[in-house]
Image (cartoon, grey):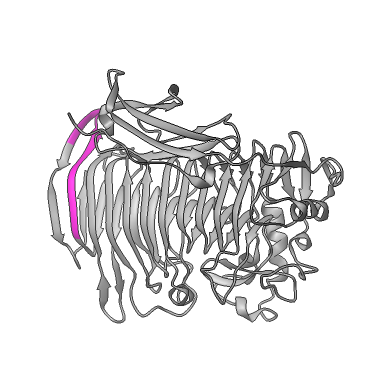
Amino acid sequence: MKDHHVINFQVLPTTISDSQATVVWEKSTFAKHLSGYQIFLAGQCIAQLPQNKTHFTIQNLQANHSYQIALYCVTEEGQRIEHTQVTCSFATMSKSERIDVTRAPYRIDPTGKTLSTVRLQQAIDDCPNGGTILIPKDAIILSGAIQLKSNMILQIDGCLTASQNPDDFRFFDSSHYIGTCNDDGLALSRYEGWELYCYRSLINIGYIDPSDRQKVVCENVRICGSGSIIGGGNQLGMAMREIYADEERFPEYTSDYKPGRRARGRLLCTMQAKNVHITGLTMIDPPCWTIHMIYSDTIVSNSLKILSKGIDNGDGWDPDSSRNLWLFDTEFDTGDDCVAIKSGKNPEGNVVNIPTKEVHIFDLNIKGGHGIAIGSEQSGGIEDIYISDCVIKNTLYGIELKAQNERGGYIKNVHIHDCHIDRFMAHPVTYNADGHSAQTLPVFSDIFLTNVTITGEGRVIELIGFSNDVTQKTEPIEGVHLKWIHVKAKMQEAEILLTHCRKVHLYSISVLKEESWITPIDNQDIESVTFQPMAIYL
């Protein structure tokens, strides 16, 4: 019998609360021969899932209690396969003390008509270890920037909405802030690959310590609930840009972009944080990016809706020189990249030299935007990226690996499987090119696409390596494996373009044409097409 076992069956520790926990796993190569999985708790079947769902959140648990959970694979005929059982154990947290901020002693205005930053921050500062700050259902809390602390929960069942006044996202008294800020009350942050001073985000976790960017400064934080966070949108973003549009006053921001665009805060930002869980919420209209993770470790984001359509630079989920990241069961409709994986820009990214690695992305429903981007700010390196069971439709780029020629750095060990996407590209880009050049060209290597359906138009796969016209040096994309690729092109012809590539393996690439499948490319190795452009028409 084929081995249907799942692997890495685990409860993510960051997701464990006093009443719930989330279990995840990786399916075997033969998962397509299964109908799904059964999950058992205390001997009772609590869930039956299809084979493309590799996560489950167990709810209504007792606080401070130990549990064992088991998973079985189920055949196409609906039979449980006994020998596939895998188990794991976990213990829930102690009961969390919940503080309703609309009640005494804080009595925050629940109508959203009164700015409540000071009272909300006071409640956070007063929160006991392991406690929960609660914005209750139907309450609307209007706030500027707030700073969370270690070992706390922010539960939003109502609505947290951002002030439209950029001054509410500055420090006017930074005496209690351990991080660095400038004379204008802006905090040290990172944007588009540069460390610089920015307006604070609506929700802030941690800070940047330039003397030790690997140090953990905030940990064990959960932002959860059934409500929404509304970030002020373009109105707040444009207001934040105005003061920093003066390039003579702020020469450190001078670039080919107006400096003000880089001074905007985000909706939620973690900096040098560890063990953060973001779950359950609808996140709407940030002033630019939605969730930004800088120099952070072990961040889990799941069961979210991220909506930023029409927002300038309205990215959804941006890990930046961070590691051990999980994103799943999330819906995107954004004004830019839905996901953008980063690690700094030349020359700073090379000097800081903190890669983004171990990123696990699965079960996404992407309805619009630019798609999933890996790069272009990747000077510190990006590696070990795993993307599966995602539906990416109506996007400009599908899944795109990208770098600017002058950026240096690398992207390697990228695995994409069991996805429906618009297109796949790995190539140079020309924009966002300010800063001194790196000494080497970017390196892209070890890229695997398996069982992927592509439904875009025209050029559905594009692989273009890097070249420097001045030095005549090239850096081919190397080690690309395309296996079981199914093209459902909307036009008469679909195109695969290979330029400056080496060791490209094509196996079973098929196209649906006139309602029937044909396989024009099957089991070919293109060992070296470096310096030779190659186009394949399906």
Against 437, residue 414 (above or below) is above
| Label total for image | 0
Identify the image quadrant of residue 490: top left
Against 176, residue 315 (above or below) is above
The answer, for residue 501, to whether it is visible in the render is yes
**Magenta stretch containing residue 231, yes or no?**
no
Q: Quadrant of the N terminus?
A: top left
- Report x, y in % for residue 310: 60, 48
Who's the residue at 64% across and 56% down the image?
150
Identify the image quadrant of residue 135: top right
Who's the residue at 43% across and 55% down the image?
373
The answer, for residue 389, to whether it is visible in the render is no
Who's the residue at 61% across and 40% down the image?
281
Identify the image quadrant of residue 40: top left
Left or right: residue 443 compared with residue 211: left
- Report x, y in % for residue 308: 59, 47
Please state which of residues 48 and 356 is positioned toward the viewer in this rendering: 48
The part of the chain drawn in magenta is 503-518
- Report x, y in % for residue 395: 45, 45
- Report x, y in % for residue 182: 71, 75
Q: Quadrant of the C terminus?
A: top left
Left or right: residue 463 compared with residue 335: left
Against 369, residue 33 (above or below) is above
**Magenta stretch containing residue 516, yes or no?**
yes
Left or right: residue 513 compared with residue 339: left
What kind of secondary structure does the magenta stretch mostly adopt? strand
Against 429, residue 468 (above or below) is below
